[in-house]
Image (cartoon, rainbow, N blue to C red):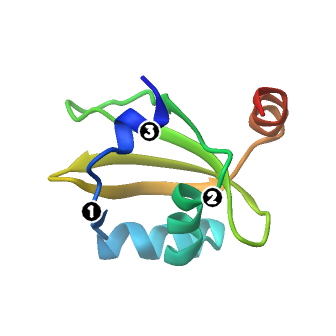
């Protein structure tokens, strides 16, 4: 599925306090950095491995400062709900750079 198709109709973000704290404590990724990934180009989205019934996606993109992040998310009621966010791994960075 194209990134533009998946994100079509998205109105905002739905933030879970526990996930926000976990992303900050474990990876020093802020809410604003997560949101920036979805507004900056290039953005690559793939289906993520999920151990729940809820379908999850992985977004690979960059912040306004150029930080390369991997963000796992789901879509609920036209809102992006971030599950986790971290710096891209070395392998993910290579794939991202080759793709763009």
Residue placed furthest toward the left: 77
Quadrant assignment, res 85: bottom right
* Residue hosting label 3: 4
User: Element type at marker 3?
Assistant: helix
* Residue hosting label 2: 40
Residue under the point 42% across and 73% down? 20
Residue placed furthest toward the top: 1
Residue under the point 21% across and 53% down? 78
| Alpha-carbon span between mark 2 and mark 1 | 16 Å
Quadrant of the rendering where the C terminus is positioned: top right
User: Element type at marker 1?
Assistant: loop
User: Element type at marker 2?
Assistant: loop
Query: Foreground: 73 or 28?
Result: 73
Residue 87 position, x and y percent, is 71, 55
Residue under the point 42% across and 23% down? 1
Q: Contact, CB < 8 Å: mark 3 with mark 1?
A: no
Residue 11's disc number: 1
Query: Foreground: 68 or 19?
Result: 68
- Vertical order, 97 against 81 (above or below): above
- Vertical order, 61 against 54 (above or below): below
């Amino acid at each position: 599925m194209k990134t533009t198709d998946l994100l079509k109709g998205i109105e905002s973000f739905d933030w879970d306090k526990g996930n926000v704290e976990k992303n900050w404590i474990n990876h020093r990724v802020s809410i604003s950095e997560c949101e920036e990934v979805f507004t900056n180009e290039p953005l690559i989205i793939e289906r993520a491995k999920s151990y729940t019934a809820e379908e999850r996606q992985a977004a690979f993109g960059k912040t306004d400062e150029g930080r390369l992040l991997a963000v796992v998310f789901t879509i609920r009621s036209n809102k992006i709900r971030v599950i986790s966010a971290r710096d891209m791994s070395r392998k993910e960075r290579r794939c991202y750079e080759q793709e763009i």
